[in-house]
Amino acid sequence: MGPKKHEDLELAYGAGHINPGYNSTTLRSVTGDNSSCNNTELGRAWDLDYPSFSLAVEDGKPIIGVFTRTVTNVGSANSTYTAYITTPAMCTVEVEPSTLSFSTIGGREPSK
């Protein structure tokens, strides 16, 4: 998808956040209540807990990034998930741990 082929759909994919920073006013417009936002520091795009990743790249510099995620088992109890990664030959990706096993639905901690 690209702006030359789908001008009207350019923002119709992904999470859609161009600037995910909120203050109390914008937060209240989203939540519809009296929520407040005391920390308005801009974060890094890769700290957003989306299923995709974002990494700033500078010409001539090594590209290294560490992404941390908290996972929740939305499958059945006693589920096991194994990372499957496909990358270009010039990239190396490591997933730790590469396999997660859960004993409960909604579990956040992998069973040991």
Image (spheres, rainbow, N blue to C red):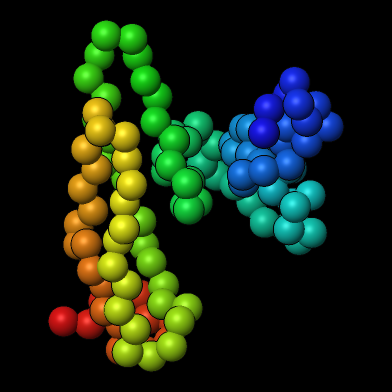
Can you name the residue that lies furthest to the top here? 60
| Residue at 33% across, 9% down | 59
Q: Is residue 1 above or below residue 63?
A: below
- Residue 17, percent from left and from top: 64, 39
| Residue at 68% across, 27% down | 2
Q: Is residue 106 above or below residue 8?
A: below
| Residue at 62% across, 46% down | 15
Quarter of image, res 79:
bottom left
Closer to the camera in the image, 16 or 41:
16
- Residue 78, percent from left and from top: 32, 89
Can you name the residue that lies furthest to the right here? 8
Can you name the residue that lies furthest to the front here? 89
Quarter of image, res 53:
top left
Q: Is residue 54 above or below residue 59?
A: below
- Residue 92, percent from left and from top: 22, 38
95 sits to left or right of 14: left
- Residue 35, percent from left and from top: 67, 56
Q: Is residue 24 visible?
A: no
Q: Is residue 96 visible?
A: yes
| Residue at 25% across, 33% down | 89
- Tell me the quadrant of the picture where the C terminus can be found: bottom left
**How many numbered callouts?**
0
63 sits to left or right of 47: left
- Tell me the quadrant of the picture where the N terminus can be found: top right
111 sits to left or right of 70: left
